[in-house]
Image (spheres, helix red, strand yellow):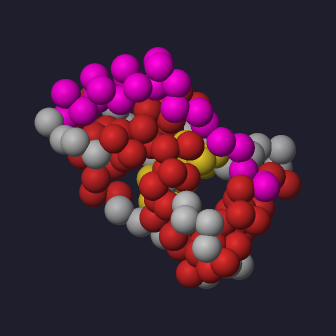
Amino acid sequence: MTVLILDAGALIHVENKPRGRVYGLCRDALDSGTHARIPTVVLAQVWRASPRQAPIATLRRICKTIPFTDDTAEAVGRLLAVSGTADVVDAAVVVAALSHGGAVLTSDPGDISKLADAAGIAIPLMVV
């Protein structure tokens, strides 16, 4: 199974539909021996620690996080320069997909596609 990289829209989907498609895909990944992954910068964008976010906390237990390291920051900066865009979080998702050979689980494929196209790469997208 391909590694799933979750963007902010995927986490928001889980918040609104706790046992919906995103949770199911992450559960399937875990059952197949592959963990879905959440870039830590995505978690920072979404997480507010409210009781409403209990489904995201549950999801975090079955996913692995991808740290935002110095190397990641440099790769994100280069991607933003090439694409002429400014969304650090979306760029981090693309960098994570590249480094882990994964597919992006997103609610906004346009932004991810624009970044991937600017870098001259193809990233599989799954829309939620």
Residue extent of the magenta highlight: 61-83
- At 61% across and 73% down in the image, what residue appears? 50
Whether residue 123 appears in this view of the structure is no
User: Going by the image, does 9 lie left or right of 48?
Assistant: left
Left/right placement of residue 82 relative to residue 40 reads: left
* Total numbered labels: 0
Residue occupying image coordinates x 65% and y 42%: 65
Q: Is residue 67 visible?
A: yes
Left or right: 99 as drawn, with respect to 18:
left
- Within the image, what quadrant is residue 17 found in? bottom right
Query: What is the chief secondary structure element of the magenta stretch?
Result: helix
Residue 18 percent location from the top left of the image: 67, 78
Find out whether residue 48 is within the magenta segment.
Answer: no
| Residue 25 in picture, x, y percent from top left | 68, 63
Task: Provide residue 105's location: percent of width, then percent of height.
Answer: 51, 57
In the foreground, 91 or 34: 91
Name the side, left or right, on which 115 lies relative to 54: left
Where 112 sits versus 55, above or below? above
Q: Position of residue 3 (x, y in %)?
A: 64, 43
Q: Quadrant of residue 74?
A: top left
